[in-house]
Image (tube, grey):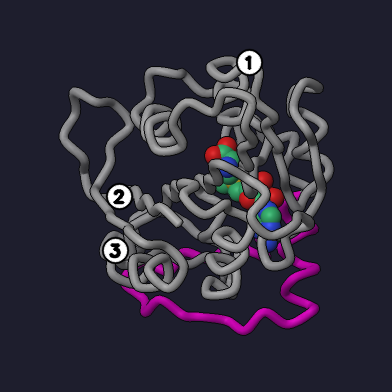
Amino acid sequence: MKLFSKWFGRKHLRPELTPDLAAEIRRSFEASSGDEEHFPSTIDPRIAHVGFVLETIGELGRGRALDAGCGKGRFARIVRERNPEATVVAMDLAVSMLRHADAGLGRVAGSLLALPFADDSFDGVYATESLEHAVDIELAVAELCRVLKPGGRIAIIDKNAERWGHLETPVWEKWFHREELLKLLRRHCVEASCRPISYWEDVEPDGLFLAWQGRK
Ligand SMILES: C[S@@+](CC[C@H](N)C(=O)[O-])C[C@H]1O[C@@H](n2cnc3c(N)ncnc32)[C@H](O)[C@@H]1O
């Protein structure tokens, strides 16, 4: 496949986000929505990643949450179920992914690099395995924090740069060192922390995933 290469043992390259690359990323995800194995439309609510998002953003009441890079909205569906009075906005680059998201969600096409929302407009913001595709990570984190209200909470789950090479990745994908995202979050948040996270609570994390949280 043209877009993917096995880079086991190779250095983590950092491509520039040119218009061509942005178009390539969009095309790739638009074409992937039929791939239910790699881009599932549901997630078991007992999975620790879901618990982390729910715990971090907290009880929303009639508040607003943003799932940034929501894919098919599998996290957003559960956030809405747990917060039936809240407005949960599911946003993704790929319209074909969004079509799978529940109609009860606010479904919005947009980019992590130019979020189509006002400053300070969400009580909770989260991004699960989407920041790794944003390429301009500094800008994406600034955008996620811009739309968060003061006092609001942000959750990011993504892959650990120390495990780079563990999986096949597209050429634009980036994984993160814990301090790398903490430094970016601390520019906008009064507190931020990071911990390893596994899929299941009763299984020790294998180091592949890290979970960051911050409070603006
Ligand atoms: C691996 S999927 C994760 C989807 C979802 N967060 C989940 O955990 O099920 C990555 C998603 O990020 C989206 N994405 C990639 N780059 C993006 C960008 N710049 N802005 C918004 N979404 C983006 C893709 O379209 C894709 O749906």
Kindly tell me whether residue 46 is visible in this rendering: yes
User: Does 190 sit left or right of 107 as displayed?
Assistant: left
Q: Position of residue 44 (x, y in %)?
A: 46, 18
Which label sits on residue 84?
1
Bounds of the magenta segment: 1-29
For marks 1 and 3 on the same chain, the one whose residue lies earlier in the sequence: 1
Element on which disc 3 rests: helix
Disc 1 vs disc 3: Cβ atoms closer than 8 Å? no
Q: Amino acid at mark 3?
A: Arg
Q: Is residue 31 above or below residue 107?
A: below
Q: Earlier in the sequence, mark 2 or mark 1?
A: 1
Whether residue 42 is visible, yes or no, is no
Q: Of the residues tagged 2 and 1, which is closer to the observer?
A: 1
Q: Tell me whether the residue at label 2 lies in contact with that at label 1, contact meaning CB atoms closer than 8 angstroms.
A: no
Ligand 1 lies under 8 Å from the Cβ of mark 1:
no
180 up-or-down from 78: above or below:
below
> How far from the left and from the top, in percent, is residue 103?
81, 22
Residue matched to label 3? 178
